[in-house]
Image (cartoon, rainbow, N blue to C red):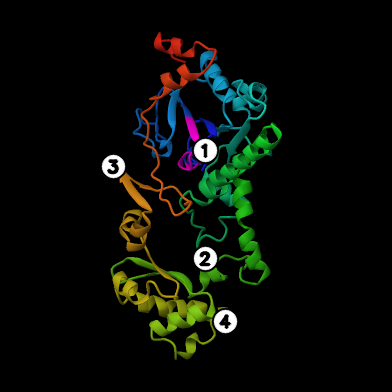
Amino acid sequence: MLSGIRIVEICGIGPGPFCAMHLADLGADVIAVERESSTSVTGAKNAPRNPLNRGKRSVVADLKTAEGREVVLKLVESADVLIEGMRPGVMERLGLGPKQCQARNPALVYGRMTGWGQYGPLASAAGHDNNYIALSGALHHSGTAGEAPSSPITLIGDIGGGALYLAIGVLAGVLKARQSGQGSVVDAAIVDGSAHMMQLMASLTSRGLLNEQRGKSVHDSSHFYATYRCADDQYVAVGSIEPQFYALLLEKLGLADDPRFARQWDASRWEELRGVLSEIFVSQPRQHWCELLEGSDACFAPVLSPREAARHSHMLERGVYFERDGLLQAHPAPRFDDRVVTPGPIPTHGADTERVLAALEGNDLAALWRSGMQP
């Protein structure tokens, strides 16, 4: 779908690489500019192939050298997008900021991925996913009453509020550039994106379905929207919000005539009823509840690990997961015309450097590389 769009990615960690991978999954030509020495987030040297690099071309360049910076500037001359995830000001100090890059290519969309944004009192501070969603308000409702908020895995901030918002932003910028010839700078901050995602919660607040206090709303305290432990220490999730779905859940659990469950929206009874359902679900293993409830309108699903999910019949039929190079991966999403697209392979570190440099016009960077003066 994105064939013909070229993206230069200044590699980092987290949401920037995910965004570039997502765009590569959708057909963009992504050139990942990596450091000479490959390290993992834990600091280990010679880190294994990064699944976030799938479908990309890997180029090695040292941005602290003039030659390395020239590699990037040459690449952006023929690119539609540059993606970077440095702290504010770092790319400018390297001579690779928006002004320098757009001087080479006025139509370039310059995508900037940060946690706090390009300006503001916290802009230069370090942080991670849980810090950003804590400040934005997105972490507040994660957890139960009387307990500390539970930091979810890095999906709400890094991916939802970060990578996907950056992807939308750069694609909007490409559309603008193709209409006007003028590039733009996309300031994708996780605090902004994760706050924007809360608009759905705002709509629930306006209808009285979300309480400012954690553990007092439908999604974090009701008995009909919750997870339950089973006899085998596995878990299931129910989300029977609508009255007809709630009625079906009660029918299947043998509770249709139980007067305690008659008033679904009486929040004063939720804690008690949650206890009743907990006793019921813990009485049987997860598979029992799958056989009873799965596929019905009771709004039910087992809580699966990624490997369990890959083996589930629904996920198998849709081909959601695949395994390659010993790694369990998910196929690109969304789908177009009901096609399941297999993404490109994960390149070895720097595998495409010489070929990419040789293709650049009017420079001797490839010759420098071959002579051992590697940028």
- Residue 186: give x, y in percent of width and height: 64, 38
Q: Is residue 28 magenta?
A: yes
- Cα–Cα span, label 1 and label 3: 24 Å
The span picked out in magenta is 22-31
Q: Position of residue 266 (x, y in %)?
A: 57, 81
Residue 37 tag number: none
**The label number, if any, that marks residue 146 in the structure image:** 2
Callout 3 amino acid: Gly
What residue is rendered at 61% in x and 71% in y? 209
Q: Residue furthest front?
A: 337
Mark 2 touching mark 4, by CB under 8 A? no
First in sequence, mark 2 or 1: give its number. Answer: 1
Tag in front: 1 or 4 = 1
Badge 4 marks a residue whose secondary structure is loop
Looking at the rendered structure, the secondary structure element under dot 3 is: loop
Q: Amino acid at mark 4?
A: Asp
SS state under label 2: loop
Q: Is residue 139 left or right of residue 254?
A: right
Q: Given the image, on which type of amino acid does mark 1 rest?
A: Gly
Q: Which residue is mark 4?
A: 266
